[in-house]
Image (cartoon, rainbow, N blue to C red):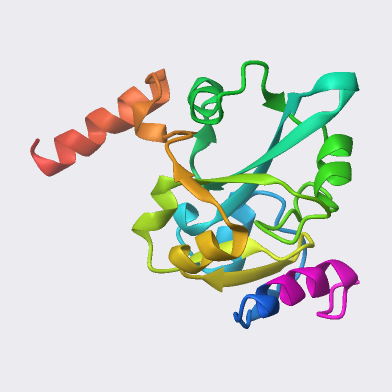
Amino acid sequence: MNDLSHPAIQRVVEVASRKGVALDIRVVPGRTRTAEEAAAAVDAELGQIVKSLVFVAPRTEGRLAPIVCLVSGPNQVDRALLAAVTGEVAIRQATAREARELTGYPIGGIPPFGHGRDVRILMDQDLCAYQWVWATAGTESALFRVAPKTLRMLSNAVVAPVADVPWMRAPTASSFGSRLSFEAGTGA
């Protein structure tokens, strides 16, 4: 089902509406399981795509406390930074099953808000550099455009340095070669 009446999309719309925000949901053909697919589907920069990544921290009696990180498309969560920001010692990425149980949505369709329970949400500070970002609206093919400030309000997120940004990663042979050709082309 790829129409706007899908129950998962409706949950996202209702949460935004309760906070006074009308979302313009775009249902795109096919799936947008990756940030690259989402960027291509809505003709946006990769950095404008919001990835909702679910992490868990163990609690007593085997319970898990969910933490959703809203991360800019090219970035990855740095677990050491995430642990420092959250104060959690034993934090790990949720399995697909855990992510669905804790948020109410499958991986690829997890929105930044409207989860089935209380979820701690952290927002990558790199998303704040854009006028507009695109986030998933409950299914793999539904996206909405939103200002980062509004996204923060809707998700009740804390903006924090949780991302390992691409330019900070150790260079690989291919990135070293492309950096050399870029510098050579600019006269740097």
Q: Which residues are magenta?
A: 1-15
Image point (63%, 55%), residue name:
37
Who is closer to the viewer here, 170 or 120? 120
Quadrant (top left/top right/bottom left/bottom right) for the N terminus: bottom right
In this rendering, position of residue 49 left or right of residue 106:
left
Residue farthest left in this picture = 187
Above or below 2: residue 63: above
**To which quarter of the image does residue 65 belong?**
top right
Determine whether 117 is above or below 58 in the image. Answer: below
The residue that appears at 42% across and 36% down in the rendered structure is: 161
Picture coordinates of residue 156, whole percent (x, y)? 58, 57
Residue 82 picture quarter? top right
| Vertical order, 130 against 54 (above or below) | below
Q: Quadrant of the C terminus?
A: top left
Q: Nearest the camera: 161 or 187?
A: 161
Question: Is the stretch drawn in magenta largely helix, strand or loop?
Answer: helix
Q: Position of residue 138 (x, y in %)?
A: 77, 62
Task: Give the total of numbered labels.
Answer: 0
Give the residue furthest to the front: 60
Residue at image point 83% right, 43% down? 102
Q: Nearer the viewer, residue 172 or 121?
A: 121
Query: x, y (%) of residue 2?
Result: 85, 73
Magenta segment includes 21 = no
Residue nearest the observer in this picture, 182 or 121: 121
Q: Is residue 23 left or right of residue 81?
A: right
